[in-house]
């Protein structure tokens, strides 16, 4: 059963600057739904519209089958975690957590019970008497989460809750939020600009850019079959390598410098003599011995991460990055053999940016898995 | 800061000298209030003996105590009224959204440019027509609406993150409750600052109490001070100075108590 449904929802300020354009999506009960996009894409605005903090210019918002466009936030049965946590600085942790319950004039006994349960679950029992300024970033984050959990609202909205934390803590909180959501069966709408967060946490992801929906789908689907160039470059790290391409006879020519042999079957769906963009993931620029090589490329940068090595090549006017396992001994200026197969290449229309053909190798793998 | 010794000496010398000049009148008043009358008239600066006579006379000859009480009541009334109205107005200017909010605010601020003296006649007529002359209400009412206070509190309230308001909206909290339970406690420092400022300016007010009172029973202490001076043929400077010192005392006490908060409040938002 769908919990939230948006139909042609748009937002514009002063009837001129449009921030969101005809958003259509339905979010299921108990789903972890991630809104991801670069800053200014309208993702926070969309979240705030669901919360009722921002007016909807046109379109309808349904919750549990009812139109709630003009329902005030308090009647929408939701909780929200803000980027800056929005903790009340003059109240203790305990008072902060109970703030919402107090506002609803809930029975004191019930409040105490919920407070203890929540504090226990979030590991805040020791900190209840402290003020927010005496807490570390991670602890504040947990208080903000606790405040949202204690309300027992079935819908939880989060607006970039992890962006103020350091990388290590962020990875930990990612897992904790995910676990909490599953345990409590919450419907979660989560806004982030970080595609790693989106990929690792979301049951489904919606990619937004410039107020328009680019693609909605499961993380892996977005990775393997990005609907357009924007999604292809936004999802995945390092980003997908791309270059202008044309099919000439039995060759696919990329950036006027790489020629990849193609068979007729590989390009049968593609229009001839049309400008295209070819995209290939970093892990598919494979490391090979000189015998198996299909191409030789110039190395312009090497990054050692310990468990893997990022090697950047120059291809025409583009820089392509390869991700190789282990610690590879490669130096800037080397000419390195690489293996490239047309089966791993996705094709996009150069004018519209839309996907024309996803990499065929992924489909085969999926087929095997099923 | 590390400074060579001679620089330090020069600096402190200059500071002490200027401090002395600034405080000289106040020091003289203090000294004169304890000095026997004969010595004041002969122009002595350092007295041979000290006396409390002037203080006794100041209380005996004039209803100084009743003046002080009046001043206290009027100042407290003005302070409370200003705090209440300024904070409510500032709340509306920051947290409520309505058309023309900013324009209205600028209009509000523009009234700061009209000196009180310019509006004193209409104010007097209003208070007279309301039959409020010689009442505490009449003395304090014209000062309740204060553009400066609204401005100061608006700046403070603006620093409260919008998310706090939104979080309380989601929790189902109304504006009045948010104002009482979140905004006021968070802006405590500025409220204290404004309160002290309002109290002191009310305490030192002269022109309005002079106009709005004709009766000793509601006169404030500043008017009383003036009476000390003019009622005698020969001015008794000692008594006048003693009165002055008594009047200044509450101001000083308040300043000492509120100094830290006052500084913090007045510079808040100036930096950062």
Image: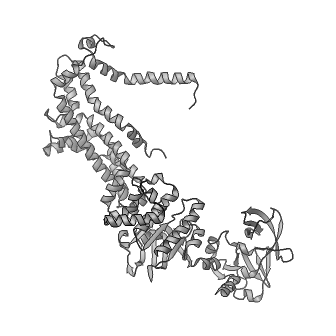
Q: Residue at x 17, y 19 (%)?
A: B232
Residue B27, quarter of picture:
top left
Q: Which residue is drawn at 26% across and 22% down?
A: B241
Residue at image x 53%, y 63%?
Answer: A162
Residue B225 in which image quadrant: top left
Query: In the figure, A203 relative to B258: above or below?
Result: below
Viewer-proximal residue among A228 and B81: B81
Residue A68: percent from the left, percent from the top? 38, 76
Left or right, residue B105 beside residue A299? left
* Colouring method of the image: one colour
Is residue B104 in sight in this rendering? Answer: no
B80 vs A33: above or below = above
- Quarter of the figure with residue B66: top left
Q: Position of residue B99 (x, y in %)?
A: 35, 61
Task: Work out which quarter of the rendered image holds the C terminus of chain A and state it.
Answer: bottom right
Q: Where is residue B168 in the image (x, y as percent from the top left)?
A: 37, 62
Is residue B267 left or right of B181 when viewed as pictured? right
Residue B163 or residue B158, whichever sits in front: B163
Answer above or below: position of A216 versus B219: below
Instruction: Write the residue at 53% across / 71% down.
Output: A178
Q: Position of residue A182 (x, y in %)?
A: 50, 74
Query: For the image shown, how many numbered marks are present on the structure?
Result: 0
Taking A308 as reference, is B49 left or right? left
Q: Would you say residue B51 is visible in this rendering?
A: yes
Left/right placement of residue A354 relative to residue A305 reads left
């Amino acid at each position: 059963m769908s919990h939230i449904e948006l139909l042609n929802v748009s937002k514009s300020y002063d009837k001129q600057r449009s921030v969101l354009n005809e958003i259509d999506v339905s979010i299921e009960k108990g789903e972890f739904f991630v809104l991801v996009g670069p800053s200014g894409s309208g993702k926070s605005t969309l979240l705030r519209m669901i919360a009722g903090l921002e007016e909807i210019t046109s379109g309808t918002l349904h919750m549990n089958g009812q139109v709630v466009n003009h329902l005030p936030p308090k009647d929408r049965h939701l909780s929200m975690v803000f980027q800056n946590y929005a903790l009340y600085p003059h109240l203790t942790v305990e008072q902060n957590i109970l703030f919402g319950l107090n506002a609803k004039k809930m029975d004191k006994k019930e409040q105490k019970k919920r407070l203890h349960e929540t504090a226990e679950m979030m590991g805040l029992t020791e900190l209840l008497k402290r003020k927010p300024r005496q807490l570390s970033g991670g602890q504040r984050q947990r208080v903000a989460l606790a405040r949202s959990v204690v309300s027992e609202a079935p819908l939880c909205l989060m607006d970039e809750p992890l962006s103020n934390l350091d990388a290590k803590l962020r990875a930990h909180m990612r897992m904790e939020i995910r676990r909490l959501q599953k345990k409590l069966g919450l419907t979660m709408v989560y806004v982030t600009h970080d595609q790693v967060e989106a990929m690792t946490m979301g049951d489904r992801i919606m990619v937004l850019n410039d107020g328009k929906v680019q693609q909605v789908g499961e993380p892996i689907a977005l990775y393997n079959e990005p609907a357009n160039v924007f999604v292809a470059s936004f999802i995945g790290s390092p980003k997908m390598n791309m270059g202008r391409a044309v099919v000439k006879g039995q060759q696919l020519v990329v950036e006027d410098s790489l020629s990849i042999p193609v068979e007729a079957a590989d390009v049968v769906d593609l229009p001839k003599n049309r400008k295209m963009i070819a995209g290939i993931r970093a892990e598919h620029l494979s490391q090979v011995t000189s015998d198996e090589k299909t191409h030789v490329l110039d190395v312009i940068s090497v990054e050692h991460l310990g468990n893997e090595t990022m090697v950047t090549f120059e291809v025409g006017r583009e820089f392509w990055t390869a991700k190789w396992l282990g610690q590879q001994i490669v130096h800037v200026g080397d000419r390195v053999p690489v293996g490239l197969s047309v089966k791993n290449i996705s094709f996009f229309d150069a004018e519209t940016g839309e996907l024309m053909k996803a990499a065929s190798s992924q489909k085969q793998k999926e087929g095997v898995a099923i | 800061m590390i400074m060579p010794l001679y620089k330090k000496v020069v600096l402190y010398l200059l500071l002490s000298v200027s401090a002395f000049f600034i405080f000289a009148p106040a020091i003289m008043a203090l000294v004169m209030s304890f000095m026997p009358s004969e010595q004041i008239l002969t122009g002595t600066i350092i007295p041979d003996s000290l006396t409390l006579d002037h203080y006794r006379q100041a209380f005996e000859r004039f209803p100084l105590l009743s003046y002080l009480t009046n001043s206290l009541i009027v100042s407290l009334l003005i302070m409370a009224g200003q705090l209440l109205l300024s904070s409510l107005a500032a709340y509306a200017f920051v947290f409520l959204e309505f058309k023309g909010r900013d324009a209205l605010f600028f209009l509000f601020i523009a009234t700061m440019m009209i000196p009180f003296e310019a509006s004193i006649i209409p104010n007097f007529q209003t208070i007279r027509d309301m039959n409020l002359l010689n009442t505490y209400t009449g003395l304090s009412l014209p000062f309740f609406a204060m553009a400066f206070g609204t401005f100061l509190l608006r700046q403070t309230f603006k620093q409260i993150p919008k998310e706090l308001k939104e979080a309380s909206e989601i929790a189902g909290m109304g504006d009045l409750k948010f104002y009482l339970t979140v905004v006021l406690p968070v802006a405590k420092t500025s409220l204290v600052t404004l309160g002290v400022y309002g109290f002191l300016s009310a305490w030192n007010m002269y022109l309005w109490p002079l106009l709005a009172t004709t009766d000793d029973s509601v006169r404030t202490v500043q008017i009383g001070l003036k009476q000390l001076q003019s009622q005698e043929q020969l001015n008794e400077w000692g008594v006048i100075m003693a009165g002055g010192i008594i009047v200044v005392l509450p101001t000083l006490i308040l300043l000492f108590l509120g100094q830290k908060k006052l500084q913090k409040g007045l510079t808040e938002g100036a930096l950062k």
